[in-house]
Amino acid sequence: MPAYITHPELQGQGSVTYRTEYTYVDNTVIIGKTYDYRLADVSYDGVKEYHNIMVLGVSVIEPIPEKYILNQAYPNPFNPATSISFHLPESQFVSLSVYDLTGRLVTTLVEEHLAVGRHTVSWDAGEYGSGVYLYQIRAGEFTQTKKMLLLK
Protein backbone atom coordinates (compact mmCIF):
# COMPACT_ATOMS: atom_id res chain seq x y z
CA MET A 1 0.00 0.00 0.00
CA PRO A 2 1.47 3.36 -1.02
CA ALA A 3 2.26 5.94 1.59
CA TYR A 4 0.35 9.19 1.23
CA ILE A 5 2.12 12.34 2.28
CA THR A 6 0.51 15.58 3.36
CA HIS A 7 2.27 18.78 2.33
CA PRO A 8 1.74 21.93 4.42
CA GLU A 9 1.92 24.10 1.29
CA LEU A 10 -1.27 22.43 0.02
CA GLN A 11 -3.51 23.92 2.67
CA GLY A 12 -7.01 24.67 1.41
CA GLN A 13 -9.23 27.69 1.87
CA GLY A 14 -12.07 25.91 3.60
CA SER A 15 -15.63 25.87 2.27
CA VAL A 16 -16.06 28.64 -0.26
CA THR A 17 -18.68 29.39 -2.92
CA TYR A 18 -16.16 30.15 -5.66
CA ARG A 19 -13.80 27.94 -7.65
CA THR A 20 -10.35 27.47 -6.13
CA GLU A 21 -7.39 26.12 -8.10
CA TYR A 22 -4.33 24.59 -6.44
CA THR A 23 -0.92 23.78 -7.87
CA TYR A 24 1.98 21.86 -6.42
CA VAL A 25 5.49 21.35 -7.78
CA ASP A 26 7.13 18.10 -6.69
CA ASN A 27 10.87 18.78 -6.80
CA THR A 28 11.71 15.23 -5.70
CA VAL A 29 10.57 13.49 -8.91
CA ILE A 30 13.07 11.12 -10.50
CA ILE A 31 12.75 10.74 -14.28
CA GLY A 32 11.72 7.21 -15.24
CA LYS A 33 9.72 6.52 -12.07
CA THR A 34 5.94 6.56 -11.81
CA TYR A 35 4.16 8.62 -9.18
CA ASP A 36 0.54 8.61 -8.05
CA TYR A 37 -0.94 11.75 -6.56
CA ARG A 38 -4.12 11.66 -4.53
CA LEU A 39 -6.13 14.63 -3.35
CA ALA A 40 -8.15 14.69 -0.14
CA ASP A 41 -10.61 17.07 1.42
CA VAL A 42 -10.00 17.61 5.11
CA SER A 43 -12.84 19.04 7.20
CA TYR A 44 -12.27 21.45 10.06
CA ASP A 45 -12.86 18.42 12.32
CA GLY A 46 -9.87 16.63 10.69
CA VAL A 47 -11.96 14.10 8.74
CA LYS A 48 -10.28 13.20 5.44
CA GLU A 49 -12.23 12.32 2.33
CA TYR A 50 -9.87 10.89 -0.32
CA HIS A 51 -10.59 11.34 -4.01
CA ASN A 52 -9.79 8.71 -6.66
CA ILE A 53 -6.24 8.64 -8.00
CA MET A 54 -6.07 10.52 -11.29
CA VAL A 55 -3.56 12.30 -13.48
CA LEU A 56 -3.92 16.04 -13.08
CA GLY A 57 -1.71 17.76 -15.64
CA VAL A 58 1.60 16.33 -14.51
CA SER A 59 4.65 17.46 -16.45
CA VAL A 60 8.38 17.03 -15.92
CA ILE A 61 10.44 20.18 -16.27
CA GLU A 62 14.10 19.82 -17.11
CA PRO A 63 16.39 21.40 -14.56
CA ILE A 64 18.32 24.53 -15.54
CA PRO A 65 21.75 23.49 -16.84
CA GLU A 66 24.63 24.37 -14.55
CA LYS A 67 27.09 25.07 -17.37
CA TYR A 68 27.37 25.52 -21.12
CA ILE A 69 27.52 22.23 -22.99
CA LEU A 70 27.89 21.50 -26.69
CA ASN A 71 27.00 17.87 -27.32
CA GLN A 72 28.34 15.61 -30.03
CA ALA A 73 26.20 15.70 -33.17
CA TYR A 74 23.90 12.69 -33.46
CA PRO A 75 24.05 10.63 -35.51
CA ASN A 76 27.70 11.03 -36.35
CA PRO A 77 28.73 9.94 -38.96
CA PHE A 78 25.50 11.00 -40.69
CA ASN A 79 23.75 11.03 -44.07
CA PRO A 80 22.18 13.44 -44.86
CA ALA A 81 20.94 14.95 -41.56
CA THR A 82 22.19 15.24 -38.01
CA SER A 83 21.09 16.96 -34.80
CA ILE A 84 23.19 19.19 -32.59
CA SER A 85 22.10 19.87 -29.02
CA PHE A 86 23.50 22.31 -26.52
CA HIS A 87 22.72 23.55 -23.01
CA LEU A 88 22.53 27.17 -21.89
CA PRO A 89 22.71 27.99 -18.16
CA GLU A 90 21.50 31.52 -18.89
CA SER A 91 19.56 33.33 -21.57
CA GLN A 92 22.10 34.29 -24.19
CA PHE A 93 22.66 35.37 -27.79
CA VAL A 94 23.80 32.20 -29.56
CA SER A 95 25.56 31.63 -32.84
CA LEU A 96 25.88 28.04 -34.09
CA SER A 97 27.73 27.69 -37.38
CA VAL A 98 29.11 24.91 -39.57
CA TYR A 99 32.53 25.18 -41.26
CA ASP A 100 34.49 23.01 -43.67
CA LEU A 101 38.05 21.93 -42.81
CA THR A 102 39.53 24.99 -44.54
CA GLY A 103 37.61 27.21 -42.11
CA ARG A 104 35.11 28.42 -44.72
CA LEU A 105 31.65 29.11 -43.32
CA VAL A 106 29.22 26.54 -44.74
CA THR A 107 26.03 27.61 -42.97
CA THR A 108 24.76 29.30 -39.84
CA LEU A 109 22.17 27.20 -38.02
CA VAL A 110 21.37 29.58 -35.17
CA GLU A 111 21.93 33.28 -34.74
CA GLU A 112 19.50 34.55 -32.14
CA HIS A 113 18.84 35.15 -28.48
CA LEU A 114 17.79 31.87 -26.80
CA ALA A 115 16.30 31.05 -23.42
CA VAL A 116 17.91 29.01 -20.65
CA GLY A 117 17.74 25.24 -21.17
CA ARG A 118 18.46 22.50 -23.67
CA HIS A 119 18.20 23.25 -27.38
CA THR A 120 18.44 20.99 -30.42
CA VAL A 121 19.04 22.06 -34.02
CA SER A 122 18.94 19.83 -37.10
CA TRP A 123 21.21 20.19 -40.11
CA ASP A 124 20.26 18.66 -43.44
CA ALA A 125 23.54 18.48 -45.36
CA GLY A 126 22.00 16.86 -48.45
CA GLU A 127 23.45 19.52 -50.77
CA TYR A 128 26.99 19.21 -49.39
CA GLY A 129 29.71 16.68 -50.19
CA SER A 130 31.09 13.95 -47.96
CA GLY A 131 33.73 15.01 -45.49
CA VAL A 132 34.55 16.30 -42.05
CA TYR A 133 32.73 19.43 -40.93
CA LEU A 134 33.25 21.55 -37.83
CA TYR A 135 30.39 23.06 -35.87
CA GLN A 136 30.99 25.88 -33.45
CA ILE A 137 28.83 27.49 -30.80
CA ARG A 138 29.36 30.99 -29.44
CA ALA A 139 27.26 32.03 -26.47
CA GLY A 140 28.55 34.96 -24.46
CA GLU A 141 32.10 34.10 -23.39
CA PHE A 142 31.57 30.40 -24.21
CA THR A 143 32.97 29.06 -27.49
CA GLN A 144 33.40 25.42 -28.43
CA THR A 145 34.01 23.53 -31.68
CA LYS A 146 33.40 19.87 -32.50
CA LYS A 147 33.72 17.62 -35.56
CA MET A 148 31.12 15.66 -37.50
CA LEU A 149 31.42 13.40 -40.52
CA LEU A 150 29.08 13.44 -43.52
CA LEU A 151 29.21 10.13 -45.41
CA LYS A 152 27.33 9.78 -48.68
Image (spheres, rainbow, N blue to C red):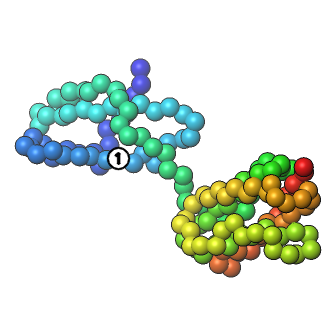
Residue at 62% over, 59% down: 119
Q: Is residue 18 found left or right of 122 in the rendered image?
A: left
Measured along the vertical axis of the image, is residue 70 above or below residue 24?
A: below
Number of marks in the rendered image: 1
Q: Residue furthest bottom?
A: 141
Compare residues 27 and 69 and report the one nearer the observer.
Answer: 69
Furthest-front residue in this view: 127
Compared to 138, does 12 lie above or below? above
Q: Position of residue 61 (x, y in %)?
A: 50, 50
Callout 1: helix, strand or loop? loop
Q: Residue at the spot x=87%, y=69% of the render?
A: 100
Task: Tell me if residue 152 comes above or below residue 64 in the rendering.
Answer: above
Furthest residue in direction top, as rendered: 1
Please name the amino acid that badge 1 sits on.
Answer: Tyr
Q: x%, y% of residue 111?
A: 64, 73
Rendering quarter of residue 148: bottom right
From the viewer's perspective, is 81 left or right of 94? right
Residue 49's spot in the image, x, y percent? 20, 27
Residue behind mark 1: 24
Q: Is residue 134 left or right of residue 124?
A: right
